[in-house]
Image: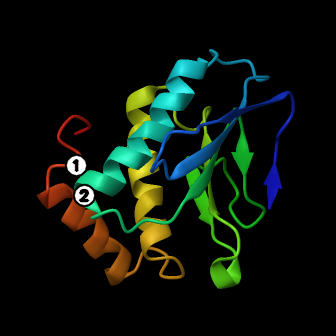
Amino acid sequence: MKLKLTAVALLLLGAAGCRAQTVTLTNDGPGPRISRDNAIAIAQQYNDLNEQYMLGQLPEVVIVIADHVAVSSVPDDVMGFTVCPRGNKKPCTIYLGLDANGYGMRSLKFTLEHEACHVKTYGHGHDEVWQHCMFDLASKGAFHDLW
């Protein structure tokens, strides 16, 4: 896994019940900058998704928002990916790539929801279990403002 992380700004979110505890934001690429407020909004989106559509069952996560995210096994930039350590001793990490998402908040939110299903179904890739999670979100209206 290759990840470009330079000029890191760490935002600690201390709200009670907040599942997205840490957002790491990098803004060193050629594209438009994402604001601190938008980074916090992405974390809040995870928390809202968890409460509204996942019955509060998602674990805490770290969200990394970077200009460029690349995974060695994938030839092109990725919009996002999720890593959960074995044994649940540390939180899962959701990586969101700004450049692959066109630096747009709508795309980042959709990618975050996609990755939240990976957190819920970790280890299932894009199989039927993960697809059921996405269909469930869609049937409950989670994507109503995104597509």
User: Relative to the observer, which residue lies in front, 90 or 29?
Assistant: 90
**Left or right side of 90 for 78:** left
Q: Residue at x 39, y 40 (%)?
A: 45
Compared to residue 93, the image places residue 102 above or below, namely: above
Whether pointer 1 and pointer 2 mark residues with C-beta atoms closer than 8 Å, the reply is yes
The secondary element bearing badge 2 is classed as helix
Q: Amino acid at mark 1?
A: Ala
Q: Amino acid at mark 2?
A: Tyr
The secondary element bearing badge 1 is classed as loop
Q: Which residue is mark 1?
A: 142
What's the coloring here?
Answer: rainbow
- Quarter of the rendering occupied by the N terminus: bottom right
* Label 2: how many Cα within 10 Å (few below 14, some 14–19, many 20+): some
* Label 1: how many Cα within 10 Å (few below 14, some 14–19, many 20+): some
Compared to residue 44, the image places residue 49 above or below, namely: below
Point out the frontmost of discs 1 and 2: 2
Residue at the far front in the pictured view:
16
